[in-house]
Amino acid sequence: MALAERIDAQGEPPPEKRDDDVVLGDDWVAPDATVERELRESRARRGLFSLNRSPLTRKIITFNLIALNVMVAGILFLNTSRDTLAIQRANAAQAEIELVADVFEAQIPRTAPVNFATGDGIDVAATLDGIELRGGTQLMVFDARKVLVGEATGAMAPAAGETASEAADRPTVISDLLSAIWQSASGMFDMLSGDAPLTLEDRLRRLIEEGDPRETRVVQSSSDDGDTIFTALTPILQGDRVVGVLGAVTPASEIDTAVRLERERVLQMFMIATLVSIGLSLVLASTIAHPISDLAEAAEIGRDRNRSRTANGRIRIPDLTARPDEIGRLSGALRGMVGALYDRIDGNEQFAADVAHEIKNPLASLRSAVGSLRMVKKEEHRTKLLDVIDHDVRRLDRLVSDISNASRLDSELVKEEEQQFNLLEMIDNIAQFLGEDAKTKGIEFITDLPPRPIRIHGLEARLAQVFVNLITNAISFCEDGDAIRIWARRRDNRVLVVVEDTGPGIPDQALTKIFKRFYSQRPETDFGNNSGLGLAISKQIVEAHGGVIWAENIRPTEADVTSEPLGARFVVGLPL
């Protein structure tokens, strides 16, 4: 069951998620109530074999198998047991052929002429009959002219223990299959080359011709059946003269058997590891491919609905945030993004409704004034109606301008490039300019800014618009004899800028509304001169910079909230 859905029968909340909770694959699925019908149907059709249609699954399996194959190939290639056995067998073959040569040399007279072909000086056949050779070993004697004069085949039984035939009877299915494939491929190449196979006598004679007949040599090669054989050559000397050459061909089936058995064990482990790797890859792929497929299908459902212009409710992204991995983060980010888009859509719809409502008021007033203008006869009445029309036209013009600025604000905040600037210098310039306007109305204007500069990163022009709105708003509510104070303080990782005035304050019921669009709490004498968008725009700009803004009343004592306010205070907090 999903981690987020673990609720007991009594309806108690799920336990807090622990760090050691591991959620794999479809062990965590979003509740059916949070996903679309199409997505639930897709999940119902999904099975284990559906992963074979996932390119991501194929990539995971392929890469895991490539790594496993490289490792097994390295083990087989770097295995030195065969080389060690081959060296030991070559040394034994060399010692054996030299010992047989010593038997021949002991029977050769030192000075008398020797002819192996006629039997002068030594009886080759009798000497060969008296020598016991390892089973399977073939011994050939050549005279000085490289003519075969005698041969013998060993029949000595092997030492106690498992014989080569017994070891060869042990099943090696995988190795035999690979060997058969290799033999077939190499046989095809041999057929294409057109070379006739050589007899054992011809092979030995060619080896004698290719090397120095006075040296003992051991050559490792393969027989026609693909078995490993060792060919040893050594001279038969009469003093310093070469009178013949001994050649011994010894099969090394026990080496091939040992290597084949070892390779079989490695390949068996490789097959088991391959199956385990594929299984784990499928599990891993299911933990990645299925959730990503759900997220992609949810987005595609929204795209298809948008194309078909069908409205079946909001698109809900599956909630996979309980997963302690990047897919959980992706799900949370997508859900947050979709939620923000829907909030933006709702905001635009509400904004359009508010705009329509705000425009209807001056339009209704204009319609009434124009209708009355046609009926009135007195000049003073016509003048009043013309004043109303002029006021409403100017109100509409101001409203449309503010609405246009507010609608462009979001895109402009994204497009404009933030820079570092001195916040106190910007506030001081605004205060000097607007302070002159306040003084002409008899309002005392006070600035209290720290001497040291405070530099922040943001849009200087937009933040200047915020403080201009706050200060002009304070000036509009103040009368002759009131005061406005602007001060700023640095607090750890933020800066607070406060605009205070000694005006009438803010009605308690308006404290939570003044930052809403088109809301205006002004005297009747000032009706229609403000669009009610200034504070809403200011809040939007401040929040775009990661800051906060709020309003409160200045009271004689904070303990008595019923006391008459001494003025209003607007606080802007910006991160440093």
Image (cartoon, rainbow, N blue to C red):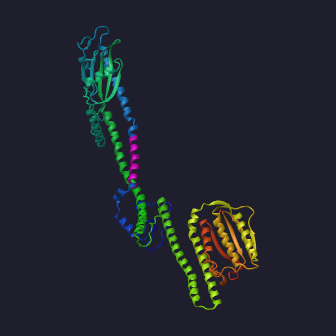
Query: Where 75 sits versus 427, above or below?
Result: above
Query: Is 66 contained in the magenta span?
Result: yes
Q: In this view, does 408 lie to the left or right of 275?
A: right
Question: In this image, 20 relative to 544: left or right?
Answer: left
Quadrant of the image containing the C terminus? bottom right
When asked about the image quadrant of residue 490, the answer is bottom right
Question: In the rendered view, would you say 166 is above or below 368?
Answer: above
Residue 450 position within the rendered picture, expressed as x and y whole percent measured from the top left:
74, 64
In this orientation, which residue lies closer to the viewer: 156 or 39? 39
Q: Is residue 243 above or below residue 395?
A: above
Q: Nearer the viewer, residue 143 or 113?
A: 143
Q: What stretch is highlighted in magenta?
A: 56-74
Give the total number of marks visible in the rendering: 0
- Residue drawn 38% across the image and 55% down it: 55
Q: Can residue 557 be seen in this view?
A: no
Image coords of residue 174 (percent x, y) = 30, 43
> Where's residue 568, x and y in %?
69, 77
Q: Does the magenta stretch include residue 173?
A: no
Answer whether residue 470 is visible to the viewer in this image.
Answer: yes
Query: x and y percent of residue 451 in the render?
Result: 75, 63
